[in-house]
Amino acid sequence: MSLSLLSILLATPIALLALYGLIRSEEFKGHLTAFPRSNSWGYLLMGISTVWFLYLVKIEDISDFESYKRFMMFGFAGIGIGTTFFVRDLLAARGAAVLMLLVAKLMVDTARWIDTDARLAIVVWAYVMVIAGMWFTISPWRLRDLLFWLAKSDRRLKGALCLLLTWSGFILVLAFSLYRTPSA
């Protein structure tokens, strides 16, 4: 996948979500505050994260792990499925946190080979997602608290949404200009 395509696939949904939040802010607040405890979002995000992580373990070619790979696959599958069924509290927040880590890995892997300093926008964004993903994995209630804090104030929420819209616009500009390669 090219960095241009990845940037478009990441920035477009964020921009659309921010626009939705700015246009229908009361409805958006309801979705925002309901998200961390949503079982349907939790099942979806944990399912995607578990399958994606298992795929990454499967394609990993570190020879030290080769003899243990089958056990690791079963163990990680058990953890993903077990978490989904036995740790339902804040499941969507946990799933979002794990997905942040996986998306950040994809972002860094994709940006690694691009020969422009502008790739650092994606790399820095990825590292922010790694920090947030680790923090919210360890303490998912912090994501819930952050979303509730944002939803309490119209000004705060609109400011955050404007920031997201601006950032996604910046990434889209990079995607259509500096991230484009002759082979992309």
Image: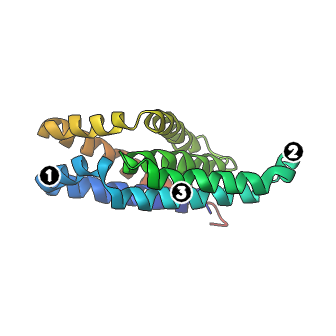
Mark 2 closeness class: few <14, some 14–19, many ≥20 residues within 10 Å: few
The residue tagged with tag 3: helix, strand or loop?
helix
114 relative to 140 in the view: left or right? right
Q: Which residue is found at the position 18% from the left and 41% from the top?
A: 151
Considering every residue shown, the one lying at the far bottom of the view is: 183
Residue 164, position in %: x, y?
32, 45
Considering every residue shown, the one lying at the far front of the view is: 86
Residue that mark 3 sits on = 81
Residue that mark 2 sits on = 64
Residue 177, visible in the rendered structure? no
The residue tagged with tag 2: helix, strand or loop?
helix
Whether 97 is drawn above or below 54: the answer is above
Q: Which residue is found at the position 62% from the left and 63% from the top?
A: 1
Q: In which quadrant will I find the C terminus?
A: bottom right
Mark 1 and mark 3: Cα distance apart in space: 35 Å
Camera-nearest label, 3 or 2:
3
Q: Which residue is found at the position 35% from the left and 61% from the top?
A: 40
Q: Identify the image quadrant of residue 123.
A: top right
- Mark 3 or 2, nearer chain start: 2
| Amino acid type of the residue tagged 3 in the rendering | Ile
Give the numbered dot on residue 39: none
Q: How many marks?
A: 3
44 relative to 75 in the view: left or right? left
Mark 1 and mark 2: Cα distance apart in space: 51 Å
Residue 178, position in %: x, y?
55, 52
Residue that mark 1 sits on = 25
The answer to whether mark 1 and mark 3 are in CB contact below 8 A is no
| Amino acid type of the residue tagged 1 in the rendering | Ser
Residue 5, position in %: x, y?
53, 63
36 relative to 26 in the view: left or right? right
| Amino acid type of the residue tagged 2 in the rendering | Asp
